Amino acid sequence: MHGDGAHLGDPFKVDGAWYRGNLHMHSTASDGAWPVERAVGWYRERGYHFIALTDHRVVTDTARFRTPEFVTLAGIEMDGFDPALDSRYYLLGVGMRRMQASSTEWSREEAGQRVRDDGGVVIVPHPYWIGWNARHLAGMAGFVGLEVFNSVCERTQAKGDAGAIWDDYLDNHGLTWGLAADDAHWKYQEEGRGWVMVRAPELAPDRLLHALRQGHFYASQGPAIVDVRISPDTVDVACSPVRRISVLAARMRGRTYWAQDGSALTGIAHARLGAEKYLRVEVEDTQGRRAWTNPQRV
């Protein structure tokens, strides 16, 4: 479910401030090792602006932790077996108003619809880890995006990077956003290794949810993307110091730029080839940490 307003997928043209958040994490209310207070407090103490605690099959109440500088969104990780897919599914629901729990008897479509009907957004978590490909995603209605990076899946099984699945979907099916999350279970040193930077007019639940629907954010493991400007002829990128900047597009129409001789890149001007269908940017620093912009139709 994407919006249809101005600057779809482009947070760099939106007025407001940047807010850092994590939209996938767990506590002892499901299979996390830390109690709610400690889990939520970890993010608040490190300067995050918002979180969604997404325990399995239950919405854990985090309202008591909200302050003017720290927003908590209702969250849940739903799962079940969908005969239409002949596959198990996992979905994140974020920002619901009344939902308290999910059922494994729900189909994937029913689970997603219940979240949307309750005012929330649906995100596909760890698609590589669960064995999904672009065709699984193409048959699903109303999700705002997928996790292009999931820290715990990368730490435990090297299956956290869903970039190829994302591009396959963008090449062949349509537009969807890419998020990073740590999926913290507090067991594998995965916490704090993936988040989203949301651009919004103010730190408020409705503003954050609107920004997620519109694609007004980028995903990161560490690098900052300062600006991306797409014109008919060029893609101009500004970022924190990195060793690689990649412009990705449909099929083979992108290009990667590498820092030379131990220096760092803080920007590029990429000459467009034309007929790219979509454009997105990925950067990587010297520690191998990446950041991803959302795709824009061109």
Image: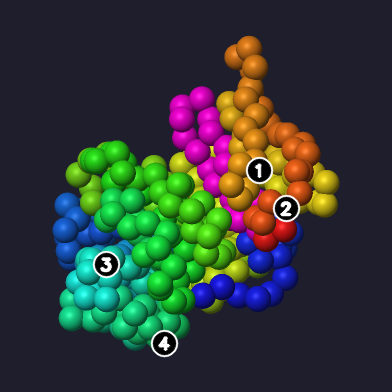
Q: Name the residue type under label 1.
A: Arg
Please identify, in this view, whether the residue under mark 3 or under mark 4 is nearer the observer. Answer: 3
Mark 1 or mark 3, earlier in chain: 3
Please identify, in this view, whether the residue under mark 3 or under mark 2 is nearer the observer. Answer: 2
Q: Which residue is mark 4?
A: 117
Q: Is residue 58 visible?
A: no
Q: Which mark is residue 275?
A: 2
Q: Which residue is mark 3?
A: 89
Q: Nearer the viewer, residue 238 or 63?
A: 238
Q: Which residue is mark 1?
A: 253
Mark 1 or mark 2, earlier in chain: 1
Q: CA distance from mark 3 to mark 4?
A: 19 Å
Q: How is the image coloured?
A: rainbow
Q: CA distance from mark 1 to mark 2?
A: 8 Å
**In the displayed structure, does residue 15 sit left or right of residue 25?**
right
Disc 3 and disc 4 in contact, CB within 8 angstroms: no
Question: Does residue 61 sit above or below 52 in this rendering?
Answer: below
Q: Where residue 281 sits: x, y (%)?
A: 62, 45
Q: Is residue 197 magenta?
A: no
